[in-house]
Image (tube, rainbow, N blue to C red):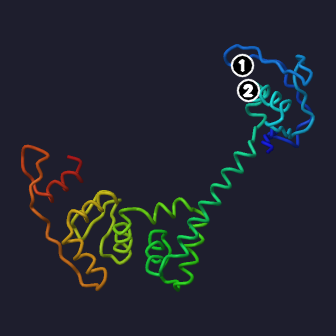
């Protein structure tokens, strides 16, 4: 199997000719080109803006080894490994196929959940939403799979929906329920929801029914300092930078 590498002039329209002469590498070693007869030659002459070399061909490999670290290359020429590009493309194609298969198997509730995380409006009909999710899975297969397999996916979906329905607000990056601070970031808000399962259930009820929930701040002590403070006071100190 051929392993093609291209040596390409960065400005092909201005390229006429280039002579890559004998040089010393970064270690001071003299690098010479050996021709097919085993003789040392003065260098390699390039007459076209693109040179194609097969690394599985012994003579082409000698030319490549001579050129790859040549001081004339940086800024003027680019080496492109076609096999490496093909392998990356093949890997992406396989990942896309996997993601599309998974996306196509999702039921409409699951599709709508992923759409929320993607920021897709749920005002579209179900078929349109599913089409957008499948398209995303094809274009961004790894991001789609990571999103789908996120252990905190439920909480991220809730935060997105709660923000859209004004159950929660986000002020300068801080999650809030009314005047109560829920978290200084998405991750902190998720931790808060996990640690306050009863309040999380009430907020989900509000999201489903629209019935407003009043949350009273807990007065559990936090022992980060010698002086006990409430969670509310601790959050206020954190917000004020004390």
Say if 185 sits above or below 5 in the image. Answer: below
* Mark 2 Cα-neighbour bin, 10 Å: few <14, some 14–19, many ≥20: some
In the displayed structure image, the side of residue 126 where residue 20 appears, left or right: right
Residue indicated by mark 1: 25
SS class, disc 2: loop
Report which quarter residue 64 is drawn in: top right
Distance of label 1 from label 2 (alpha carbons): 7 Å
Question: Which residue was labeled with disc 2?
Answer: 69
Residue 142, given in percent of the width and then of the height, sits at: 54, 59
In percent of the image, x 20 and y 71: which residue is there? Answer: 199
Q: Can you name the residue that lies furthest to the front here?
A: 1
- Precedes in sequence: disc 1 or disc 2: 1
Q: Quadrant of the N terminus?
A: top right
Q: Position of residue 40 (x, y in %)?
A: 88, 16
Residue drawn where x is 48% and y is 76% of the image: 111
Which residue is depicted at the point 25% across and 75% down?
203
């Amino acid at each position: 199997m051929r392993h093609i590498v291209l040596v390409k002039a960065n400005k092909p329209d201005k390229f006429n000719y280039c002579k890559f002469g004998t040089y010393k590498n970064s270690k001071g070693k003299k690098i010479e080109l050996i021709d097919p007869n085993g003789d040392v030659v003065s260098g390699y002459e390039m007459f076209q803006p693109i040179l194609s070399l097969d690394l599985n061909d012994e003579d082409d490999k000698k030319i490549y080894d001579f050129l790859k670290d040549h001081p004339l290359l940086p800024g003027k020429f680019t080496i492109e490994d076609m096999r490496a590009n093909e392998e990356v493309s093949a890997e992406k194609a396989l990942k896309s196929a996997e993601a599309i298969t998974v996306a196509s198997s999702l039921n409409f509730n699951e599709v709508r959940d992923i759409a929320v995380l993607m920021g897709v409006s749920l005002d579209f009909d179900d078929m349109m939403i599913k089409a957008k999710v499948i398209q995303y899975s094809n274009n961004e297969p790894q991001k789609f799979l990571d999103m789908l397999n996120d252990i905190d996916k439920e909480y991220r979906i809730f935060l997105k929906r709660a923000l859209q329905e004004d159950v929660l607000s986000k002020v300068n990056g801080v999650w809030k329920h009314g005047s109560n601070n829920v978290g200084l970031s998405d991750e902190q808000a998720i931790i808060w929801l996990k640690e306050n399962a009863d309040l999380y259930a009430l907020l989900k009820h509000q999201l489903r029914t629209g019935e407003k929930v009043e949350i009273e701040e807990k007065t559990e002590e936090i022992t980060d300092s010698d002086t006990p403070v409430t969670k509310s006071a601790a959050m206020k100190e954190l917000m004020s930078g004390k």
